[in-house]
Image: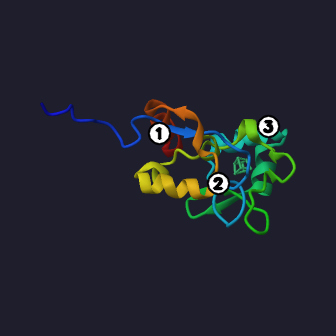
């Protein structure tokens, strides 16, 4: 008798991730932390600043989109070597949903590539397919 055909994505049994606070995803090579108006407002409120002031100090335009600025060398402007993310409760969706981004979980190879630089990926708490897909939706919003 033929076995039941399995369905769902390759990570249908879930994927493990527990952040080790290494900061790799917030530091290093230059990149972008995309933000929209809602996220900018949340960050500004968290820091006790006016949205306009916050935007002038910490946001840059990249084409039609907006990103947080970086420190020289590429670290996120809100990353602190001693304390980690200084805006953690208000961090952007992109940061909340790491490592469950579409390009990171498309294939097992993509996921294994993430694991090379992110020691928290592949260990610790197992996220279900539903949780992973909800993170994917959130980051693509
Ligand atoms: S906002 Fe916080 S979590 Fe996001 S990249 Fe910057 S330091 Fe990292």
Instruction: Give the structural element (helix, strand or loop) at label 2.
Output: loop
What residue does disc 2 label?
33
**Mark 3: few/some/many CA within 10 Å (<14, 14-19, 20+):** some
Q: Position of residue 135 (x, y in %)?
A: 52, 38
Q: On the rendered image, what quadrant is the N terminus found in?
A: top left
Q: Quadrant of residue 69?
A: bottom right
> CB at mark 2 closer than 8 A to ligand 1?
yes
Contact? badges 3 and 1 (CB < 8 Å): no
Q: Position of residue 125 (x, y in %)?
A: 59, 33
Task: From the image, state whether disc 3 or disc 1 is nearer to you.
Answer: 1
The disc at residue 46 is 3
**Res. 97 in view:** no
**Mark 2: few/some/many CA within 10 Å (<14, 14-19, 20+):** some
Instruction: Give the structural element (helix, strand or loop) at label 1.
Output: helix
Q: Residue at x 83, y 41 (%)?
A: 47
What residue does disc 1 label?
137
**Res. 1 in view:** yes
Q: Residue at x 41, y 51 (%)?
A: 106
Q: Quadrant of residue 73?
A: bottom right
């Amino acid at each position: 008798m033929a076995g039941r055909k399995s369905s769902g994505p390759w990570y249908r049994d879930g994927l493990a991730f527990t952040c080790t606070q290494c900061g790799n995803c917030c530091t290093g090579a230059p990149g972008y932390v995309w933000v929209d108006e809602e996220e900018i407002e949340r960050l500004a409120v968290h820091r006790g600043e006016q949205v306009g002031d916050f935007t002038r100090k910490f946001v840059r335009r990249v084409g039609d989109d907006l990103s947080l600025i970086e420190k020289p060398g590429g670290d996120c402007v809100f990353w602190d070597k001693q304390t980690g993310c200084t805006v953690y409760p208000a961090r952007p969706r992109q940061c909340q949903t790491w490592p469950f981004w579409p390009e990171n979980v498309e294939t097992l190879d993509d996921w294994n590539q993430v694991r090379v630089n992110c020691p928290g990926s592949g260990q610790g708490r197992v996220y279900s397919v539903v949780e992973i897909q909800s993170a994917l939706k959130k980051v693509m919003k």
